[in-house]
Image: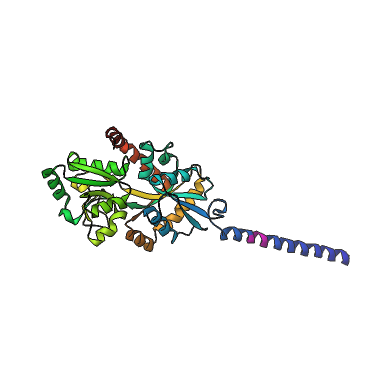
Amino acid sequence: MKKAMSLVLAVLMLCGLLSGCGGNSGNSNSGSGNSGSSGADGYPKKDVQIIIPYAPGGGSDNLVRGTMQYLELGANAVPINVEGASGYIGALQGFNSSNDGYTIMTHNEMDLISYSMSGQAEVDLYKDLEYICDVVTDYNLLCTNPDSGWTTVQEAIDYINANPGTVTVGCTGSNNVNYGTTMELLKAMGVYDKVTIVPYDGGAASETALQGNHIQLEVNSLADTASYIAAGTNIPLLVCNEERIDAYPDLPCTVENGFNVTYGKPRGFFAPKGTDAAVLSYISGKMKEVCDKPEFVEAMANLGFTVAYVDGPAAKERTLAWAESLTPVFEEMASIGG
């Protein structure tokens, strides 16, 4: 009898030990899961490549590298510059990459729209890419140089009307949103047929022309003009926006002057078509955390950007509306060979 009781007690003790071990094992697995990333299925499990479709040192490159300083993605972010064709080659590489979440891309919606509407792209990138989020806005400005003597847009308009054919206006690229913005703004000012528009291969080239007085006006981005404005060699006359901007609160906007031309250049992040929605949401959330950091806001302001986070679905909806409104602009540019 004693032997039987001892055997039962031994079995009960063994079961207790096994139960205890099983409970501890379960807690350990739960902790291991929590210590990893909170993305879908433990994403990310390896480095995430970020395609930058422009040269090192440009606005897109500065945005990505500035963002990386504050981004806590759960894995290394690896920037890859893919230059060529005004950002189109990099955009196409991003579009054709694997949709496993380990290759994303920075770009701006206005250039993505331009690729399609100009006929450059065989696919509608602005429709087919997955939108992660927008993080900053880069505004277009109407600028002059000190040689012109103009300090207001009205002074420029008055001079052009009195001296038709003597003023040249620079912009970045042809048959794109930048050219269309320039054309529409000059129309709104009533001087489109009294000036000459000269497209340049990028904002830096346009700014160089303005600094050399080869052009007297330009429509260029804040990111490309901010350092010259600070130095006093570029005089901004207008910002193309619905309201004044924090960077230059004394600078009038187009709308308050009666010019309904407000196309800016939001910049953000995109992924190949079919990327898991949970991955898109995870990266977007991490980008939102970056945008909420005051030091990031300050760093972007120093580069000429205004931090303006917009989640992926809202960014895509906004872009589709812009594309629809720009259709007649591109049709007109095509008719005049712009």
Quadrant placement of the N terminus? bottom right
Please tell me in which quadrant of the rendered image residue 71 appears: bottom left
The correct choice, above or below, for 34 with respect to 120 in the image is: below
In percent of width and height, residue 179 lies at: 29, 42
- Res. 86 visible in picture: yes
In percent of width and height, residue 299 lies at: 36, 61
Give the residue displayed 54% in from the left and 47% down from the top.
100
- Which SS does the magenta portion mostly show? helix
Give the residue displayed 37% in from the left and 63% down from the top.
295
The correct choice, above or below, for 295 with respect to 271 in the image is: below
Residue placed furthest toward the top = 335
The answer to which of 208 and 261 lies nearer the viewer is 208
In percent of width and height, residue 152 lies at: 16, 52
In percent of width and height, residue 54 lies at: 40, 50
Give the residue displayed 16% in from the left and 49% down from the top.
156
The answer to which of 228 and 212 lies nearer the viewer is 212
Quadrant placement of the C terminus? top left
The answer to which of 143 and 27 lies nearer the viewer is 143
Magenta span of residues:
24-28
Give the residue displayed 56% in from the left and 55% down from the top.
46
- Res. 150 visible in picture: no
